[in-house]
Image: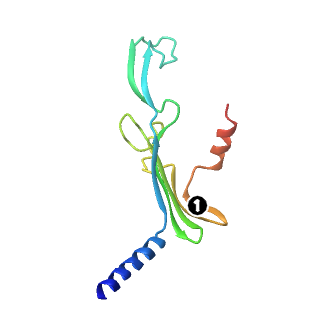
Amino acid sequence: MKSKLKLSSIAALAMFATAAHAQSSVTLYGVLDSGLLYQSTSAASFQPHAPNLGHVYQLKDGGIYASYWGLKGSEDIGGGYKINFKLQGSFNTTNGKFGLSDTPGTTAMFNQYATVGASGPFGSIDAGRQIIPMIYAMAETDV
């Protein structure tokens, strides 16, 4: 009798434990954009009498866009509500330093996004460091 009671208690706890489990997710993402730069003659200088330095081979970071990595995720807190976060930062693929190669003063690990917010039936709201809406407008209208 005692073992049946223990077994039924364990089964009931297991059933309620799975019913109370919230769904959460974390995604690691990123983009690597680097390449090999070959430059011949003195193309780096527009001086009329610049010396011909021959040719240069160099590992180049950010061929078109910056390289970046990030974490984003959400935690379901029940009732159709979620807590969301996003952390994203750029880095230089040639040396591994955080920040963009053309902005040496910015060394923050998450220098593009660092947000936390909530979403639900009302929509979503995020607070923290975000890319300004002008970036989205430029991306949609840029040829």
In the depicted structure, whether residue 43 falls above or below residue 90: above
Residue 75 x/y as whole percent? 50, 64
> Which residue sits furthest right?
141
Residue 101, position in %: x, y?
Answer: 45, 37
Q: Around disc 1, counting alpha carbons within 10 Å, would you say few (fewer than 14), some (14 to 19), or many (20 or more)?
A: some
Q: Which residue is mark 1?
A: 126
Q: Residue at x 29, y 84 (%)?
A: 3
In the displayed orientation, state which residue is furthest to the bottom.
Answer: 1
State the residue in front, 122 or 60.
122
Up-down relation of residue 140 to residue 115 (above or below): above
| Residue 134 located left or right of residue 48 | right
Q: Residue furthest left?
A: 3
The residue nearer to you, when weighing 89 against 46, is: 89
- For the point 51% across and 16% down, the residue is 47
Residue at 67%, 31% in the rendered image:
143
Q: Nearer the viewer, residue 12 or 110?
A: 12
Q: Nearer the viewer, residue 31 or 36?
A: 31
Residue 2: x %, y % from top left = 30, 88
Q: Label 1 is placed on what type of residue?
A: Asp
- Element at badge 1? strand
Q: How many marks?
A: 1
Check the picture and name the quadrant holding the N terminus. bottom left
Q: Is 12 placed above or below 50 here?
A: below
How are the colours assigned in the image? Answer: rainbow
Residue lying at 58% horizontally and 49% vertically, measured from the top left:
131
